[in-house]
Amino acid sequence: MVVLVTGGLGYIGSHACVALLESGYDVVILDNLSSGKLDVVSRIETITGRKPVLVVGDVRDTAVLKQVFNCHNIAAVLHFAGLKSPSESLSIPLEYFDCNVGGTLALLRAMHEKNIKTIVFSSSATVYGLPEEMPVTEACRAESPINPYGRSKLMAERILRDLAASDPEWRVACLRYFNPVSAHSGGLIGENPTAIPGNLMPYVTQVASGRLPRLTVFGSDYHTRDGTGIRDFIHVQDLAEGHVATLQYLQHTTGFEVFNLGTGTGVSVLELISTFEQTTGQKIAYEVGPRRSGDVAECWADSSKAERLLGWKARFGLVEMCRHAWQWEQTC
Ligand code: NAD
Ligand code: UD1
């Protein structure tokens, strides 16, 4: 079975390509190289012994989509391609809506024309906005994301839901990722380092390697067990496996579903730092600063729906997440 992976050269998409190839699927990647790198193809081949087909192009480009669907016998799509920074989306919202909503629409139109009706969409826990209860279940309200990025993800989810409601042949799953971290255990693929990371784990690894002088812990006065923020960090390989499990689920189920993908365990910022130090032997210099605006005190998933319906559960714990993140930092 051939699967189209949009954004397959990116952080999560590349891990999904590995998981798909290792599970026997054939993979066609469509990526515009806006953040993905070409050498990811050979890295995927080194890990799996199988080479994905790469088409360089934009998911909003109707002609490219037509060519992809005409040249390959695609049965399903994993749609990762998109922009992903909440803070950047505040300054260039039109780019975010164009890429994340416009890209999804163009893709769905092209799929519809070719009668390809199975899609797994990369959504985010950010659609829950400021969650009202912990842990977050799929039944929690997802109506008021706090930035354009989150709204673009929610809009795409709603388009997918309406489409599935209009035609019973569609098979649609929106996967709401919590905090994806770390890298492939083989050390060959991971997150593309950007100038200064906004997320915690890459910041920690860059302090450990000396690329950054010290971490600022954003707030230690939350009503949490140690005063720092609590998140549900999930190993990117587990996340990738979740996509394969979802594809398998969609082979025998029609309609529209959303799933939380997290570990179900909340970890505080200080707990992550101390686990990283113990696992790697690297000291993390940090200071406590003010809270970061837009942050919630705590956010972790109830992923029991994914476990029940997809038969999927995260395998890696925080120690492995730290070990593999550090290994990637030293090789990338
Ligand atoms: P990434 O930037 O590493 O990968 C995105 C890939 O898509 C890149 O290879 C990029 O070149 C490509 N791309 C972007 N726009 C494109 C377009 N218009 N046409 C074709 N290719 C395009 O990001 P990621 O972390 O792998 O995220 C993948 C998806 O998961 C995104 O949709 C993101 O919003 C979502 N997500 C990510 C996180 C996270 O923490 N990384 C959390 C929740 C949801
Ligand atoms: C952020 C995004 C979210 C996105 C997720 C994964 C915001 C408000 N949310 O989530 O939409 O899905 O990334 O990409 O941007 N922290 C520090 N110091 C740092 C960095 C982070 O103390 O230098 C703390 C934060 O305050 C937070 C925790 O670490 O408590 C995790 O932060 P981060 O990795 O940025 O993820 P989120 O904020 O949960």
Image (spheres, rainbow, N blue to C red):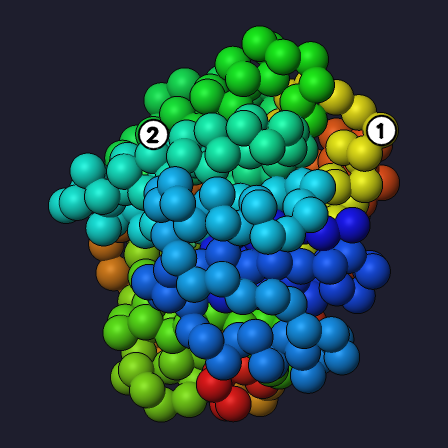
The percent coordinates of residue 186 (x first, y second) are 68, 81
Whether residue 187 is situated above or below residue 252 in the rendered picture: below
- Name the residue at 28% across, 84% down: 213
Q: Is residue 92 visible?
A: yes
Question: Could you say which quadrant of the image residue 218 lies in?
Answer: bottom left
Q: Is residue 301 visible?
A: no
Structural distance between the alpha carbons of marks 1 and 2: 30 Å
Q: Is 288 left, or right, of 263 in this rendering?
A: left
Disc 1: residue Cβ within 8 A of ligand 1's nearest atom: no
- Could you tell me the amino acid type at mark 1? His
Q: Which residue of the protein is positioned furthest toward the top in this rendering?
A: 166
Q: Nearer the viewer, mark 1 or mark 2?
A: 1
The percent coordinates of residue 79 (x first, y second) are 53, 44
- Name the residue at 60% across, 80% down: 43
Q: Are marks 1 and 2 in contact (CB under 8 Å)?
A: no
- Name the residue at 68% across, 83% down: 46
Q: Is 292 left, or right, of 91 in this rendering?
A: right
Tell me how many marks there are: 2
- Could you tell me the amino acid type at mark 2? Arg
The circle drawn on residue 252 is 1
Looking at the rendered structure, the secondary structure element under dot 1 is: loop
The percent coordinates of residue 61 (x first, y second) are 35, 45
> Which residue is nearer to you in this view: 311 or 224?
311
The percent coordinates of residue 70 (x first, y second) are 57, 46
Residue to which mark 2 is pinned = 151
Badge 2: how crowded within 10 Å, few (<14), some, or many (20+)? many
Looking at the rendered structure, the secondary structure element under dot 2 is: helix
> Which residue is nearer to you in this view: 205 or 237?
237
> Which residue is nearer to you in this view: 312 or 211?
312
Whether residue 73 is situated above or below residue 308 in the rendered picture: below
Considering only order in the chain, which callout, 2 or 1, is on the residue closer to the N terminus?
2
Q: Is 34 left, or right, of 126 in this rendering?
A: left
